[in-house]
Amino acid sequence: MSAPQPELTDLELERAEETATDDADVPRRKGWGVGFWLAVTWTVLILGLSALAPWLPFVDSPGAFGDFSVEPSAGPSADHWFGVNDNGVDLFSQVVWGGRVSLFISLSVVVIGFLLGGLIGMTAGFLRGRVDRVVSAVIDVLLAFPALVLALAVVAIFASDGNAVRPTIPVIILSLAILSVAPLARITRGVTLAFSEREFVTAARTLGAKSTRILRREILPNVVPPMAAFSLVVIAVVIVAEGALAFLGLSVSAPAPTWGKLIATGRLNMEASPHLVYFPAGVMFLTILSLNYIGDVLQGKMSVREGVL
């Protein structure tokens, strides 16, 4: 006969139930969801097409001649998946090349904002005092200033040749990078303020670690993940901002226009050929939606981890 099992007390039963409930909730909390993976798949697809555009056999080069065997502005077909524009140029190829330019601008802007905003935000959040007050005041001014007006001013200053404004990719990157520094600096400052009071930072100070070492070894590894998640949202915002500049005729021109430029050009003939707007706008919309969704999910995951710690 087996030995009799000891009976559990009410307190032990209650704790066992709580543990079982917590264990049952772990998969739900750690799950990413179907929407997240769909967003990741779309983002990887767009990045892959944009990066490999020069070598893909089904993507025409920006300077390729139009297909004169079809009517101008013809709709989708087996040979032209998104149709053609009024010059017979394949619209799918233009969307792929437009994504290449738009994503290059957006990623460049975020890298600049990540480096400058991260440095400024970490410095202000760690040093505090007068430095923090001055930096916070400058950030508030930049965030309060109308973003589009500031971008237009930068483009007008650096892209004007006296007779007309001819923006180039570096000018567009510069104008939008100025807008990305303030929000990234504010996020970095807030995260730095939170982590600078943690026990491991206090212990490092007690052991005599220098401020530069604390920033590099203790603060930076905890600041980078939330900044990276927020940067995905910033990329989406930059794509929209570039589209706004394109509608005003202040974005880069052919032979490789951006998504915003394609939409701005196609709207002139939208009633007769709506595909000229719908396809680039649809691709742009799905990309922005995917980046926002991925960024939101990642920020939520990081918030949960911080709460557990």
Image (cartoon, rainbow, N blue to C red):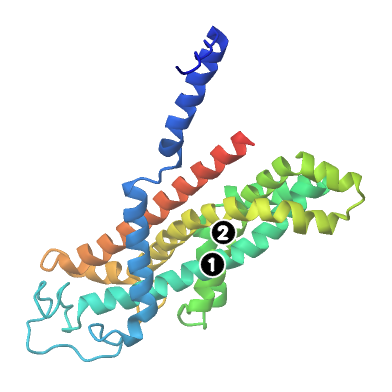
Q: What is the C-alpha distance between the residues marked 1 and 2?
A: 7 Å
Image spot of residue 168 (x, y percent): 48, 79
| Residue at the image position 35 percent from the left and 45 percent from the top | 33
Q: Which three-letter amino acid code belongs to the residue tagged 2?
A: Ser
User: Could you tell whether 36 is left or right of 209 in the image?
Assistant: left
Q: Of 304 and 7, which appears nearest the observer? A: 7
**Quarter-wise, where is residue 213 in the image?**
bottom right
User: Could you tell whether 46 is left or right of 87 in the image?
Assistant: right
Q: Of 81 and 109, which appears nearest the observer? A: 81
Q: Are the residues flagged by discs 1 and 2 in contact, CB closer than 8 Å?
A: yes
- What is the number of callouts on the image? 2
Mark 2 Cα shell of 10 Å, populated few (<14), some (14-19), many (≥20): many
Image spot of residue 68 (x, y percent): 10, 90
Vertical placement of 176 versus 299: above or below?
A: below
Kindly tell me whether residue 282 is visible in this rendering: yes
**Quarter-wise, where is residue 116 in the image?**
bottom right
**Quarter-wise, where is residue 12 in the image?**
top right
Image spot of residue 41 (x, y percent): 33, 61
Vertical placement of 262 versus 191: above or below?
A: below
Checking the image for residue 180, the label placed there is 2
Image spot of residue 121 (x, y percent): 70, 53
Vertical placement of 128 versus 234: above or below?
A: above
Q: Which residue is mark 1?
A: 109
| Residue at the image position 29 percent from the left and 71 percent from the top | 262
